Image (cartoon, grey):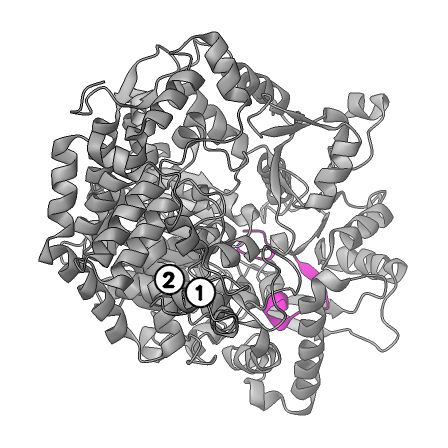
Amino acid sequence: MNQSGDCYIAHVRKTDGATQTVEIHLTETAELCSLFASVIGLQLCGRLLGLLHDLGKYSSAFQQYIRDVTGLNGEEAKSTAEKRRDKVDHATSGAQYVWGAHKAGNVPCFMAQVLANVIMSHHSRSGMKDFIDLTGKSPFLIRLGSHKTHKQEVLDKANPAIRSEIDRLLASPSLVAEFKSAITAINGSTSECVPRQNAFSLLTRYLFSCLLDADRLSTADFENPRSAEFRTTGHSPDWNTLLNRFESHIAAFESAPEINQIRALISNECRAASTRPDRLFTLQVPTGGGKTLASLRFALHRAASPETHRVDRIIYILPYTSILDQNAKIARNILGDEAVLEHHSNLSDEKDTWRNRVLSENWDTPVVFTTSVQFLNSLFAAGTKTARRMHQLSNAILIFDEIQSLPVKTVHLFNNAIHFLTQQGHTTVVLCTATMPLLQSVDSKLGALPLTQENEIIGNKTSLFDKLKRTTIIDDCRPEEWSNQEVAAYARDLQNRHHSLLIVCNTKNSALQLFDLLKSNPDAPVIHLSTNMCPAHRRHRISQIHAKLDPKHPQPVFCISTQLIEAGVDLDFGCVIRSLAGLDSIVQAAGRCNRHGNREMGFVHVLNFKEEKLGSSLKDIELAQQITLRILHEYTDNPARFDHDLLSARAMERYYGYYFYQRADEMSYPCEAGKGKPPLAKSCNLLDLLSLNQSSLNEANRTSNAAASSLLFKHSYSTAAQAFQVIDAPTQGIIVPYNADGHCGSDLIGKLAASYTNEQVTLADQVRLHKQAQQYTVNAFPKVIEKLAAEGALREVQPGEGIYYLDERYYHADLGVTLEALSEQHLLNI
């Protein structure tokens, strides 16, 4: 190898053994990282990160390792290298170089902290290093003090042009100026200390995201040069074409029914609001008001406007995969398949393989439909796969549908993130729901949204709610509660009277029990819906229900479902039974009754189910039930206080006032004591860990760790990321063999497995198979995964890839994933 660095290897292509030099990889990563970071004015910082991130690959130790592990030094060396667990540290030397520039007085401490942490952590599964952890130590400083980084060697061997540019950037006043400008912008956007410090942590993660994506893209494009064809990096979408497709579609709507005229008015108000300079909007529309298309119209007009700051993508964020399926399908039908990405499950484990680098979605598509879980994970979760997507949230329009479903524990983290994205990321945010939570009324010292009536898109909400009133809530709760047998009997009576009936339960077990009681009903078919079914399965069941609810040819039908049906699913039942829940959930259930105004009035019966066991994991529903009962009693005493309507905006404001007051202590994401590494303290919360980090700082002071306590930023990134879970028990996607109703899940599983070994399968083929697999994926909780694994019901698509599929004996035509194997006779009858 020569001193110019031209022969130093960064990557070796698996297919033909070609090599990518360190120089080329650093340069490509620098260009992309600079492009991504330029959105928030940190293009020079981005370039420096790219040039430094893999500087350690110039070491002889790394060159020996990569030649051994890729087989360039022969199969024997490869076999030995694969058995070694200790990889060569190639990330820390770049971080040490930045820190050295700080020690020399060229780079301010706060800037050096951020850049060094991003560089050293870019292959860490736990995310960025803690500046101070809960033991008072600094994993960040400990890593910087490592002597196994080959720092001097790599500096001596680095390509002279690369080394020269790094030194020039570190000495540039412009580098420091742009970073100080970003810090000043954050300081000017809020006067509150905790939200400001939280914003600094988000700024650091943003740069982390830029580097991760740039690094992975350079690697992926080298491994398969055609992979770039699947992305739009650096190119603005053709919004005018997409807008024209959309406007042509809605022009074909019939406007005769009164409800369609009201929906058209809502849509027109959204279009008019798209030119407003605000970046934060609310869209509070009663269920059935057409907010999905109306909000998309807002976004497309705003993106296409020449007066708007550049928009790179529209991201539609929903709480449940059931409505994501439905809404993404509508958008694809209007805008075209190539313009829309549907992303809701991470099929594979957090594995840093070239294949995962290519196939992991980075949301580089004009219109993205994803879940609130994926959105929040991109901001706060551990690992590199989710963090990689964060920077795509800038220069964007984010539409949050059913925002009332935001987990309470994430409220302050969410509010601060939205503030950062709108203020620093040039992003527009629209919060949509029929039941708007009071995100502006929470503790502003910890993070509240600056919402007023001026942020609302709809001019006269009260009038709109009156015009769209199509249902009445009937309080059937009673002191002795309702047994399952009594609920079933009442359901039969209501179905006979109203022809179609929806029952919404709080738990899957409750829905299954009622399904068992009613499934043999001779007068009407009974259809069960659950998240135990894959999207393709649910979609087929919903289409069956649609057919039976056709107003021109109505047929009797029961539907028994969990809450998944409440948010945006376009079904119109004659009557609804809702198990007692929060008033927001009851309002959402009411949106599935008389949805299109075909009846004079629809009725939603609220019952308290005796046998519905919520358990410790559903305490939030139990509290919501108590507050709803309080609202129901107050309504009985004084209906005028609620505008004589339990579905009114005033009723929801009162409900959320009680609910948020009761749960104020939970909104900073309290930690579960004893969990995590190091163990979490009972008094700490994730908001503190990602802002002032007082718990860790106190411990550093107590143990006289002056070096740690003197750091300007104190954030515990890794500790917080590893503790963060949107759902208390995180789910894992498994591909299911849904083979009924014209679907061939088993065939897809076979093709996906073959794609890992068949050299004739192109990257494009594999991308297509992975996207198809999303439609056959069920997100299962850990206990379910454990039980299925114990039964031998889970198998890997390809050993080592971390993508699992389900044995067909454990997938039921009516229930979806089941923990008991089906009989051969049942399989034949599916």
Mark 1 near mark 2, Cβ–Cβ under 8 Å?
Answer: yes
The reply, left or right, for residue 726 in relation to residue 53 is: right
- Quarter holding the N terminus? top left
Mark 1: few/some/many CA within 10 Å (<14, 14-19, 20+): many
User: Residue drawn at (25%, 45%), measured in percent from left and top?
Assistant: 49
The reply, left or right, for residue 456 in relation to residue 81 is: left
Compared with residue 350, is residue 202 higher up or lower down, i.e. above or below? below
x and y, in percent, of residue 746 in the image: 63, 21
Foreground pick, 68 / 176: 68
Q: How far separated are the C-alphas under marks 1 and 2?
A: 6 Å
Residue that numbered label 1 is attached to: 690
Compared with residue 468, is residue 154 higher up or lower down, i.e. above or below? above
Magenta stretch contains residue 792 = no
Question: Which amino acid type corresponds to the residue marked 2 in the rendered image?
Answer: Ser
Mark 2: few/some/many CA within 10 Å (<14, 14-19, 20+): many
Compared with residue 317, is residue 699 higher up or lower down, i.e. above or below? below
- Quarter holding the C terminus? top right
Question: Which amino acid type corresponds to the residue marked 1 in the rendered image?
Answer: Leu
